[in-house]
């Protein structure tokens, strides 16, 4: 016979503990100024950047139009226009092993194209990359091609955050993307409502031109390809930075715009031409407010549907208990988010809704066992039926929670940023869900049953006992 654990003895201590946790969470919410809102819920700029020096720039001064594209195999330029035969020129990395060779090949094959080196011409062409937000149409404004040395020194995320906060004068969210050697970051900055600025600078304004290619003197090109006098380019190459003999291009920024603020702050510290923008999004306050309203409606709909489902499948007291458990779990997780200053964004909302679903599933399993045991043991007290039902479902609860926790712990250990926060919130929520089902929901149902029994006993009192003093009870005789 399965041993019945007296869970009901812990109902009162659990109620006290929950009261303290909820009260502490509410106090922390007001003491800490509410949530640490992400830009999903407030106006702000989100930019995905990579700290990669400029290898060379290209500009188009010839007839017709020229457009550029690139992928992992090479760089491609298409020349077209009125009266001009459309022709695609491919500069494959497998055929041109260095940045200098590609730049020289571009100038030799396209008469109206000018290329200027800003790093050693000997850097591998496999390191070349381009920002995703640049206009593919080439013009007189130089178009940058960056490079990322796989052996470059890693840049700590704490340094990027410190640089951004010092420059912007506010708390800035910085997340590391990919491997640390990628120097790839997602940066979120609060901003006023305004249209997003172009992510990439409008043009480059380099200092002295470094002539290369067919139109340059052979000695000049050899000097550039060798990396400058006395091996300076090789030293820069080893460090993964632009060569010290070549000044980096300066970005022309329009002040006051969040996009330019992010790029400008990074270039002010790491150097002009060192930042490549991969993605840029702006969230206006109207969208943020709309998102907040949607979240409220979604949570209210969740509570209503659970109440309706539990009322139809079980009884009203079960439905109210399930909704109470959902509210309890939600408050506990939200309090954890507030106290730990975890960023409150759409990922956090997804974690909370996942937790509510997980907790509801566990609660319904226990409810089903309680209903079954009430039919099997009609003479047992309700509190004994609850203890029996919780004991019988304990193995299932523990096994399900542990196996799910293993998967979530893997996410927490092997991921970073928002996904790690998501996993941490899930772990806290799963523990809270088991605790809520075992001690809070069942305690409420026990309280409901006791009140129901008291009302039934009062209804069985004879009418003579309820008659007012001084007035005889009426007789049917």
Image: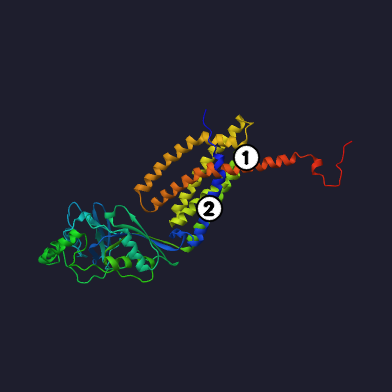
Residue drawn at 74 percent across, 40 percent down: 459
Q: Is residue 274 left or right of residue 387?
A: left
Image coords of residue 137 (percent x, y):
30, 62
Looking at the rendered image, the quarter that the C terminus falls into is: top right
| Near-viewer residue (131 or 193) | 193
Disc 1 versus disc 2: nearer the observer: 2
Image coords of residue 257 (percent x, y):
38, 68
User: Which quarter of the figure has residue 145?
Assistant: bottom left
| Discs 1, 2 touching: Cβ within 8 Å | no
Give the farthest residue toward the right.
477
The residue beneath circle 1 is: 315
Q: Is residue 134 visible?
A: no
User: Which quarter of the figure has residue 313?
Assistant: top right
The residue beneath circle 2 is: 20
Cα–Cα span, label 1 and label 2:
30 Å
| Near-viewer residue (199 or 80) | 199
Q: Earlier in the sequence, mark 1 or mark 2?
A: 2
Q: Is residue 203 left or right of residue 15?
A: left
Residue drawn at 55 percent across, 53 percent down: 297
How would you rate the neighbour count of disc 1 (Cα within 10 Å): few for under 14, some for 14-19, many for 20 or more? some
Q: Is residue 101 visible?
A: yes
| Near-viewer residue (370 or 387) | 387
How would you rate the neighbour count of disc 2 (Cα within 10 Å): few for under 14, some for 14-19, many for 20 or more? few
Image coords of residue 163 (percent x, y):
32, 65
Image coords of residue 239 (percent x, y):
20, 60
């Amino acid at each position: 016979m399965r041993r019945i654990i007296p869970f009901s003895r812990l109902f009162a201590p659990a109620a006290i503990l929950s009261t303290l946790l909820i009260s502490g969470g509410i106090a922390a919410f007001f003491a800490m100024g509410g949530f640490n809102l992400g830009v999903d819920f407030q106006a702000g700029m989100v930019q995905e950047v990579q700290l990669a020096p400029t290898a060379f720039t290209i500009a188009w001064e010839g007839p017709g139009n020229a457009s550029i594209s690139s992928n992992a195999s090479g760089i491609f330029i298409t020349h077209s226009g009125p009266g001009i035969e459309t022709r695609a020129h491919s500069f494959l990395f497998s055929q041109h092993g260095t940045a200098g060779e590609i730049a020289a090949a571009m100038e030799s094959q396209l008469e109206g194209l000018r290329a200027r080196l800003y790093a050693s011409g000997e850097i591998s062409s496999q390191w070349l990359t381009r920002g995703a937000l640049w206009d593919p149409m080439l013009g007189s404004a130089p178009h940058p091609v960056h490079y990322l040395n796989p052996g470059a020194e890693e840049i700590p995320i704490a340094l990027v955050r410190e640089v951004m906060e010092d420059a912007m004068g506010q708390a800035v969210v910085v997340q590391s993307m990919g491997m640390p050697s990628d120097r790839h970051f997602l940066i979120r900055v609060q901003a006023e409502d305004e249209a997003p600025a172009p992510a990439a600078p409008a043009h480059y304004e380099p200092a002295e031109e470094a002539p290369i290619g067919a139109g340059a003197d052979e000695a000049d090109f050899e000097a550039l390809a060798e990396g400058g006098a006395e091996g300076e380019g090789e030293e820069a190459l080893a460090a993964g930075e632009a060569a010290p003999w070549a000044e980096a291009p300066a970005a022309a920024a329009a002040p006051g715009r969040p996009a330019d603020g992010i790029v400008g702050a990074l270039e002010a510290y790491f150097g002009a031409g060192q930042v490549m923008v991969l993605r840029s999004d702006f969230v206006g306050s109207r969208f943020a407010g709309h998102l907040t309203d949607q979240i409220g409606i979604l949570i209210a709909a969740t509570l209503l549907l659970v109440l309706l489902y539990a009322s139809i499948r079980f009884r009203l007291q079960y439905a109210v208990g399930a909704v109470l458990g959902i509210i309890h779990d939600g408050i506990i997780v939200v309090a954890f988010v507030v106290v730990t200053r975890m960023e409150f964004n759409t990922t956090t909302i997804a974690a909370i809704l996942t937790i509510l679903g997980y907790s509801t599933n566990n609660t319904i399993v226990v409810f089903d066992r309680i209903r079954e045991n009430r039919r099997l043991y009609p003479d047992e007290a309700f509190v004994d039926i609850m203890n029996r039902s919780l004991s019988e479902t304990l193995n299932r609860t523990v096994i399900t929670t542990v196996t799910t926790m293993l998967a979530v712990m893997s996410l927490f250990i092997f991921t970073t940023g928002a996904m790690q926060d998501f996993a941490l919130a899930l772990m806290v929520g799963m523990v809270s869900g088991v605790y809520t089902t075992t001690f809070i929901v069942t305690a409420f149902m026990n309280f409901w049953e006791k009140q129901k029994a008291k009302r039934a006993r009062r209804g069985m009192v004879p009418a003579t006992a309820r008659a007012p003093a001084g007035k005889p009870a009426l007789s049917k005789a």
